Image (tube, rainbow, N blue to C red):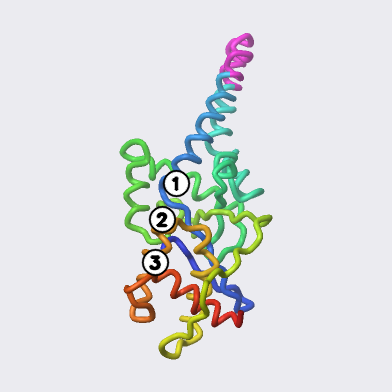
Amino acid sequence: MIDTAYPVATPEGVVLTLRLAGPLPRALAWLVDFFWRVAVMLAAMFFLSLMGGLGAGIVLLLWFALEWLVPAWCEAKWGATPGKRVLGLKVLHDDGSPVSWRSAMIRNLLRTVDFLPFAYSLGLCVMLFNRQFKRLGDMAANTVVVHVDDQTRPAPELQAELVRVPPFALNVEEQRLILAYAERSARLSEARAEELAHLAVPLVNTTYSAKAQLMGIAKHLSGR
């Protein structure tokens, strides 16, 4: 796996490339969800405090719903909680299909285990040692969290000053990887694009820009 690309083969034989979300964007999404839930609870407590014991009971029910039911419902309906939507994240099954209500409930209920011993320490450790950045809840529910690509953004053009013929024959998988790199390179920093291009040695040499060489080969493969 290069970078955070996660290939998924559909039953129709089409390979989809998903971009996995790492610990940092997921932590930021959790913080957004935490703050909006706190804001709702504080507002509810302010008004329901006037109702005495009945109000206290409603507050407890509301807290339970916001903590366990609402996140699962949001993921089952839209694939993301409000926090994930703000960060451009989405929960999917391992095969790329929309997450079900059952899976959403499982991954959310197991947050109690991922939280141990404090502040999601166990969940973070598991994610760091898992190639798909899965916490225990994701493993049990067979889900992954991915970045949602902007569908309104036009596909990047393959840029290269010169068309470059590959120095040796490439199989179909190698050609597909080079074309995928060329399309993604516009979203990467120059340093990161060069770093990934150097993985293609001996297809490229290091005497000049490895990125430019791969882009030239991609232009050749695309027939441009």
CB under 8 Å between callouts 1 and 3? no
- Residue 35 vs 176, above or below: the answer is above
Q: How far apart are marks 3 and 2 (CA)?
A: 20 Å
Any magenta on residue 202? no
Residue 147: mark:
none
Q: How far apart are marks 1 and 3 (CA)?
A: 36 Å
The residue at which mark 1 appears reads as 110
Any magenta on residue 48? yes
Q: Which of 202 and 30 is in front in this view?
A: 202
Please identify the quadrant where the N terminus is shown: bottom left
Q: Give the range drawn in magenta.
A: 43-58
Q: Quadrant of residue 15?
A: bottom right
Q: Nearer the viewer, residue 157 or 108?
A: 157
Task: Identify the residue at the far bottom of this view.
Answer: 169
- Residue 141 lies, in percent from the top left, at 49, 56
149 relative position to 207: left or right: right
Q: Which of marks 1 and 3 is in front?
A: 3
Please identify the quadrant where the C terminus is shown: bottom right
Query: Dot 2: what SS?
Result: loop
Q: Which amino acid does label 2 sit on?
A: Phe
Q: Quadrant of residue 2?
A: bottom left
Looking at the image, tell me whether mark 1 or mark 3 is earlier in sequence order: 1
- Residue 186 vs 47, above or below: the answer is below
Q: Main secondary structure of the magenta part?
A: helix
Q: Which amino acid does label 1 sit on?
A: Leu
Q: Which of marks 1 and 2 is in front?
A: 2
Disc 3 crowd rating (10 Å Cα; few below 14, some 14-19, many 20+) is: some
At 55% from the left and 67% from the top, the residue drawn is: 183
The residue at which mark 3 appears reads as 196
Looking at the image, tell me whether mark 1 or mark 2 is earlier in sequence order: 1
